[in-house]
Amino acid sequence: MEPTAGDLTDPLINHADGQLFLHEAFKIIVEEVLCKGTDVKEKVCEWREPEELARLLDLELREKGEPQENLLQRVRDVAKYSIKTSHPRFFNQQFAGVDYHSLAGRFLSEALNTNLFTYEVAPVFVLMEAEVLRGLRALVGWTEGDGLFCPGGSTSNMYAMNLARYRLYPEVKSQGLWSLPQLTVFTSPESHYSVKKGAAFMGFGMDNVILVKGAVPFLVSCTSGTTVQGAFDPLDRIANVCDKHKLWLHVDAAWGGSVLFSKKHSHLMKGVHRANSVAWNPHKMLVAGLQCSVLLLKDTTDLLKKCHCANATYLFQQDKFYDVNLDIGDKTVQCSRKVDCLKLWLMWKAVGSAGLEQRVDKAFLHARYVVDQMKKRDGFQLLRDVSSHLNQPEFVNVCFWFIPPSLRGKEKNPDYQNRLAKVAPVIKERMMKQGTMMVGYQPLGDRVNFFRITILSPLVSHKDMDFFLDEIERLGNDL
Amino acid sequence: MEPTAGDLTDPLINHADGQLFLHEAFKIIVEEVLCKGTDVKEKVCEWREPEELARLLDLELREKGEPQENLLQRVRDVAKYSIKTSHPRFFNQQFAGVDYHSLAGRFLSEALNTNLFTYEVAPVFVLMEAEVLRGLRALVGWTEGDGLFCPGGSTSNMYAMNLARYRLYPEVKSQGLWSLPQLTVFTSPESHYSVKKGAAFMGFGMDNVILVKGAVPFLVSCTSGTTVQGAFDPLDRIANVCDKHKLWLHVDAAWGGSVLFSKKHSHLMKGVHRANSVAWNPHKMLVAGLQCSVLLLKDTTDLLKKCHCANATYLFQQDKFYDVNLDIGDKTVQCSRKVDCLKLWLMWKAVGSAGLEQRVDKAFLHARYVVDQMKKRDGFQLLRDVSSHLNQPEFVNVCFWFIPPSLRGKEKNPDYQNRLAKVAPVIKERMMKQGTMMVGYQPLGDRVNFFRITILSPLVSHKDMDFFLDEIERLGNDL
């Protein structure tokens, strides 16, 4: 049917029908994702081969719409075949679990559907973001400064690089890199790949992430909590070097930053207050939900705005009737920017700093528990790593090989490493196809495939840890 | 209380309590945001001065958590003082309205809380994103190609720049811009500010967005639907030039792209199939919800991956048991990437391409209606713009001055422009403080402050348009 002016005088969307659908969908979400999806008696994943899954989901987009019952079945199917990342046996990534206050905040953010560029369209969130950033900066040890919520830690890291080069060479904003000497970023081999990706994206080139003779160092990117092993760079010692050479010190604490909530563990980031910038993802260890990622800055000279502003007059008119400093949109390279502060704010209000501290401390206790249990069992070999001088892992990453009975005591055999390398992928395939749990594996340098379990969800119990170890044995004992 | 190993054997979060809270919060969201927030008898905004609002919201984050009743009141307060962007009288930005199928998809995405980097953690969404991108590419006129959902149109535009320079000079990825000749981007003065911001961020420098003698042009960025006036660049003519000089043709169709759903209006983007890349934000005119933004590529050589990959072994192991081409995460410069496809997919399934076409056509009809009504009233003066040869606006942006009775017929007075410039800000302040509606204003070049109404929500009726005009008169007649 060709629409005409006549039949378009009324709204196209009927609120009553729409809200009825939303209610039904909400019920399915609670039932499938939040009840069944967190029940240890249910699967973590319902594995299907891609071709079969595409067929089951009937993904094709067509000319005509579908009746509501079909659509509700689709909601059910999407839930059914998606990974249950809130399941207590999902250990595959650096996010897991669910916090219901955060989730309520996320639903509210979605329903309110606004954008963080000006105070006029986001009065609550402009003020709230500032308050949350202030709270996080206080944990870093800064009483003033700046910051932003970013779409992920990689973006936060790129911002830090951009600010550092702008501080050193403000002309880069208008003239580009050609007018500058060759610049280099210092970072460790275990730093997150986003440092290299960012360097390529921003025109530095990946080769300039390591030291190049004759080039000008402008930024040191430290890591608090490396992705695989969970190691922390010694910030105080690095800050001494940065002070001496006036280098921008950036701390990528996307993973490890949450230790700052813990009186017991914040020492891992001792010296962080000396940094110029910190990237920190509360969507990881604090369970704030994807995405919740901040860049925190010590700067008080409005560098963020100077470096990124383009002064678009259609958004940032200077003759507004309120304080236009509240229009924070020109601090970012995004235009539309999602509201990511509300979920963290509501969760923080709900459990307090004390509750978040308890989550962090619990994650450490779980990691220690699983290590202790591994030591009591045959076949679990912890990775020799940077923290090998400790009895316990430094953070909540536990990296280990499972050595099947057929390989035990055969370390001297010439094919030992090759055979060991094949163990983790097979166990992984089996756990995915049976859907009982999920954990990641990877090689690192000359170390062949090993598992990395990161234990962070406040929904996990010791029983789940025990199950994890039993299940690794069950799936791998015949290899 | 210091947590101990003993009291941490059980999960910290209680599902029953959590789900009860979520249910109550859901009820408040429906009542406050979706019922009252879309009711013309209710306000679009509940204006408060920043200091007062901060006090009302009690934003401070404390050591101790709060009881559930307090937190539910906070949910209510956040809703109350937030802008009702789904209200039929919100015309302030290029997003507005609510689609309940999309919103259900957004709630489901939030609850599933996963990340688009690998097939193993997002099997449904890896396949779904590919299908949605395929559907959008088909509208551009491409039977193959590539693409990504990005956190906003600015990011999509930056990707296009990065791909274009990489195609021309692949060594930029490792060596940076220093090894390259100075590069320039061609774009129009009315293009979105993200082109300049992106150029600065990526090391080109803002000055190189206009022609510089001796520099190498590598990209032309066209606009389909400029932000303020809604103008469309003539793509076919520009494509001829790009063909001749082998330049990458990027089309920033963040705003205008949705015309491709309409048989009647897709001619505005005639020639778009000749582009190398298209940025398009379905969160704008299709009402898919923030954020929903895609970059579409004609490329079939895996440029996206070659240009951005860092081959992190902890995510992108090559010895997985499924086709590792499904692990799309190395195509992006993000690591965590939100699931933004589900909301669009579910909405598209619900109303079909025909339903989306109807929305686009309706928006045009509304724009024409409001222009016709303006012509019948005194005091509404349409902007002389690029499409002034037409009887009707080219797109759904309607730019106009309101001339209060005291200024009518006084165009020759020396202070006319100065006085006219002050009209829109005062009307805006009044409408915000009374909360009756919202619309944006801006100056442009030598044209003083004028209003821009963008009419896109499928919830709007002719009555709302009439109200809009009445209200502008009511608020501005005494100026």
Image (cartoon, coloured by chain):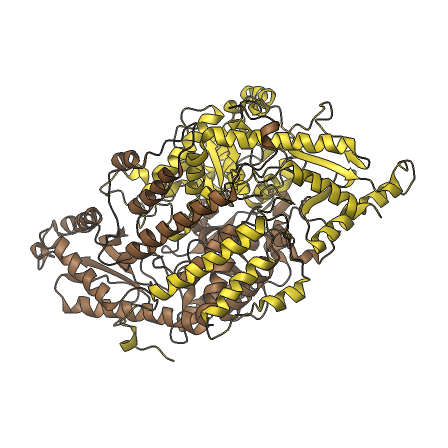
Chain colours: A yellow, B brown
Q: Residue furthest bottom?
A: A1
Q: Is residue B64 left or right of residue B329?
A: left
Quadrant of residue B411 in the image? bottom left
Quadrant of residue A403 in the image? top right
Looking at the picture, tell me which residue is in the foreground, B312 or A15. Answer: A15
Q: How many marks?
A: 0
Q: Position of residue A394 (x, y in %)?
A: 66, 27
Looking at the picture, tell me which residue is in the foreground, A469 or A408. Answer: A469
Q: Position of residue A242 (x, y in %)?
A: 56, 23
Q: Is residue B451 left or right of residue A102?
A: left
Q: Position of residue A335 (x, y in %)?
A: 41, 49
Quadrant of residue A390 in the image? top right
Residue visible at 61% across and 39% down?
A460
Q: Is residue B285 visible?
A: no
Examine the rendered structure and indicate whether residue A240 appears above or below residue A474: above
Examine the rendered structure and indicate whether residue B292 appears above or below residue A266: below
Residue visible at 37% across and 69% down?
B360
Q: Position of residue A468 (x, y in %)?
A: 70, 42
Looking at the picture, tell me which residue is in the foreground, B112 or B10. Answer: B10
Q: Is residue B372 left or right of residue A395?
A: left
Q: Is residue B186 visible?
A: yes
Residue visible at 34% across and 37% down?
A127
